[in-house]
Image (cartoon, helix red, strand yellow):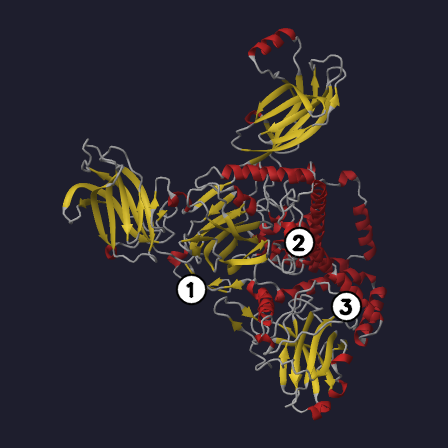
Amino acid sequence: MSNLKLGVEVASAHDLMAKDGQGSASPYAELHFDHQKFRTTVKEKDLNPYWNETFYFNVSDPKNLANLTLDAYVYNNTKGGNISKSFMGKVHINGTSFVPYSDAVVFHYPLEKRSIFSRVKGELGLKVFVTDNPSIRSSNPLPNMDTGRTESKDSRRTFNHLPNSNFVQQPQFPQQQPYMGGINQPQQPYAYGVDQMQSQSQPKITRMYSEASSQPMEYALKETSPFLGGGQVIRGRVVSGDNRRASTYDLVEPMQFLFVRVVKAQDLPNMDVTGSLDPYVEVRVGNYKGVTQHFSKTSNPEWNTVFAFSKERMQATILDVVVKDKDMLKDDFVGIVRVNLHDIPTRVPPDSPLAPEWYRLEDKKGEKKKGELMLAVWIGTQADEAFPDAFLADSAMSSVDGSVSSMFTRSKVYHSPRLWYVRVNVIEVQDLVWDEKSRFPDVYVKAQINNQVIRTRPVQARNANALWNEDMMFVAAEPFEDHLVLTIEDRVGPGKDESLGKVFIPLNTVDRRADDRLIHSRWFNLQHPYDHEIDEKKHKKDHKFATRLHLRVCLDGGYHVLDESTQYSSDLRPTAKQLWKPSIGLLELGILNASALHPMKTRQGKGTTDAYCVAKYGHKWVRTRTVMDSLVPRFNEQYTWEVYDPSTVLTVGVFDNAQLNNDSNTKDVRVGKIRIRISTLETGRVYTHSYPLLVLHPTGVKKMGELHLAIRFSSTSMMNMMYTYSKPLLPKMHYVRPLTVGQLETLRHQAVAIVAARLSRAEPPLRREIVEYMTDANSHLWSMRRSKANFFRLMSVFNGVFTASKWFGEVCLWKNQITTILVHILFVMLVSFPELILPTIFLYMFLIGLWNYWFRAQYPPHMNTRLSYADSVTPDELDEEFDTFPTSRSNEHVRHRYDRLRSVAGRIQSVVGDIASQGERLQGLLSWRDPRATLIFMIFCLVAAFVLYVTPFQVLVILVGFYVMRHPRLRHRLPSAPLNFFRRLPARTDSML
């Protein structure tokens, strides 16, 4: 048998034609030779793909090799799951061109048309050679061209390229892959044969690349069709359901619970020798039980406590409610009430609450005894009004008196404190008194609110007076617990300062303002700092003049106090409530369940997770109950928020509860988070998707599981919402008296610290690490990965300019004669009729937006590992990103330079990201990413096309020129409506990790 084989290395493709209506395509190549077929991997959204994959064909008859042909077809994958192809070009190579491997080079073949009506362009790089090396095995041919899905039972990953495991994806290269122009790179070809895969090294490589190729599908958003309380959701529409249940909790799956309300007891018997009784109640259903708090020395206690038992976990048929007497050694049995679960009624809201009843206590033998217990027992769902206050008995022990389940397993709603900016204008000081009369004091003012400290510049007081006139900004939260403390200090020597006096100002006595009106200044007498009463009496006797500090202090309520990353703000309202506008809609979130969570801890020798979710929007934080010991927790909790601006972001995070053992030093572990911009949601549609939870670890990006959500955004007034797009994004004070970028960043971190401190004092506490993770407190730190990601975002923004320039170059080179002739005709027409230029442009943009409507995104944006540059980050870059700040390196000099570099580079990456965001907003005008904004712009383009058609061009130019050069009195300090509209457009920051 002949060992002759034909090797084909599919190197890359260049300048392919866009096929998806968004200026890109997902190409792959198919090879046909001697009745054998092979297929490369699919390169998502890449017009210049790089494969570098090699396949080996068996040559059935070496004597007939010259008469055989190799056909290479390039197709666009039009669907994410099954292979559905559209033709992009082909290459036909005769057998007479086949050469040995030593003579083979990578040659870029121009793609040919399949028919006269085909539209193709670009080149395909192939390296074709023949070999008779017996160590090389032929690849497995493709049996069925339409079979493209393979599901693994253990990982449930979808492979959308090949059913054969030997066809694997090569390592990812940067998006801006340089075109090599047919130059052959000395490189040993890769061969993936069946026999080679059985070696010791090949299976590891194959599995690694196969997992890499499955990541785009593994990290993708998945639309689901669950049965919720309102009915089944199919493609965003509720098609069936119970109208009675749809009134409440219609975005979650109904879960049945057994509710037991323990109200009170009366006439309980005395159990102790002293004649006293310390009663408490234990509610048991099978292996699950809940315990109330105990009362001391009373026979008529009142608990009014509700327990909820999940019906899915109940395996018993009898409910036992036991009254016990708290004792030091062993609790005494007082009495029991047994209820058959089959006799318990079912209550569906909005039915009236079930009235409690008196039950006579029984002994262990079932005989009546002294004492009665008032209970209410019913079966309901999480829509029951008793559910939020119920103690969920999902563990073997659920206690009310401060144990695990009472604090950490219940859902909770939090509200962020009301934050204010405190503006302090230090004007001057008079009549300073200092000890050393031989010199003039070098004084400065130190202002402090809690741990926020700001200092003025030092000024030499030559006549006992000093002038600063400096502004300081702080953050404070209502209710005000701290004072504003101003200290005048004298810089005596290097590192040595002496206090000359202090001023204490309670913040609740400070004037408040909602605009930029002038606040009257005040003089404050300084309190001299003394350590002992003797010194104070001495100074009162010696000093004849009182030192005064001239200040202007106010609480600025016209600003929005930023406590989140500016790209992901969930609230843009000012602090002063009188400036708030009516809400424009309602956001409803149903947290359904999570699946395939990674084990975060070990319990009883097996990995487990105690998961809970935290959602933040505006001032309202919500925390679901903790589902203990489950990798597939079901939450089914629904929450609502009022929406005041569509350009805001909802953030949902998943965490592992580490506080179940009452260890306050252990931090809750983050599992992942999801961000959803409200403006990307269609009004009235129910979005039901399974979101992958992606987290960047020191070893790379990892999928920690999936979170299933149901989201609906409903508008109260469509006209008010459309009008919002013309309003400024931030309150008026941000433009009238703007703060610097450095001030905003410093104040944001102070605000995050205040919010974290307040929420950590709630019960159960929302810990600091949760607040920092949800608000992206560390987003300003340097990261080589984020810098590269922002750079490539910037490059992708200018891809359109580069493409247009290249297209015009092709027109000049007459590559496509028909296109060039049409351009010449259009050019002559526009020169002859210049008044048609602007109407044609706007009409063309309107048609582009109308065309892109059919290709608009159907899913909300989500984390994109490729956009975040997380799929090709190096270990050294990860080590740098997860390094402490300041760095933990031992060399002090290197540490200083390293921290300085990271600080500067962090600002650079923010600037680059902001520039990229502006370009992405420009791209989003016609992309239907924000359907309302695109509709507004399309209407504007249509109207502008007709207005500009009837308006003489010369008049239009004069009006525009006069408007640009208008008098300053005619200018307004607030941004214009077009600029406000542009700033509200969504950018791709929502998909950034």
Q: Secondary structure at mark 1?
A: loop
| Residue 895 position within the rendered picture, expressed as x and y whole percent measured from the top left | 69, 42
Give the image quarter of residue 142.
bottom right
Report crowding for label 1: few under 14, some 14 to 19, many 20 or more residues within 10 A (C-alpha). some
Viewer-side residue, 719 vs 566: 566
Q: CA distance from mark 1 to mark 2?
A: 51 Å
* Residue projecting furthest to the top: 541
Q: CA distance from mark 1 to mark 3?
A: 54 Å
| Residue 112 position within the rendered picture, expressed as x and y whole percent measured from the top left | 74, 80
Q: Is residue 487 shown above or below 929? A: above
| Residue 47 position within the rendered picture, expressed as x and y whole percent measured from the top left | 70, 68
Q: Please state which of the two labelled residues, at mark 1 or mark 2, is closer to the viewer.
A: 2
Q: Please, what is the three-letter code of the amino acid marked with disc 2?
A: Glu
Q: Please, what is the three-letter code of the amino acid marked with disc 1?
A: Ser
Between discs 1 and 2, the one toward the N terminus: 1
Q: Secondary structure at mark 2?
A: helix
Residue position marked by numbered label 3 in the rendering: 179
Q: Secondary structure at mark 3?
A: loop
The residue shown at (73%, 90%) is 66
Residue position marked by numbered label 1 in the rendering: 240
Viewer-side residue, 320 vs 965: 320
Between discs 2 and 3, the one toward the N terminus: 3
Report crowding for label 2: few under 14, some 14 to 19, many 20 or more residues within 10 A (C-alpha). some
Q: Please state which of the two labelled residues, at mark 2 or mark 3, is closer to the viewer.
A: 2
Report crowding for label 3: few under 14, some 14 to 19, many 20 or more residues within 10 A (C-alpha). few
Give the image quarter of residue 42.
bottom right
| Residue 841 position within the rendered picture, expressed as x and y whole percent measured from the top left | 75, 62
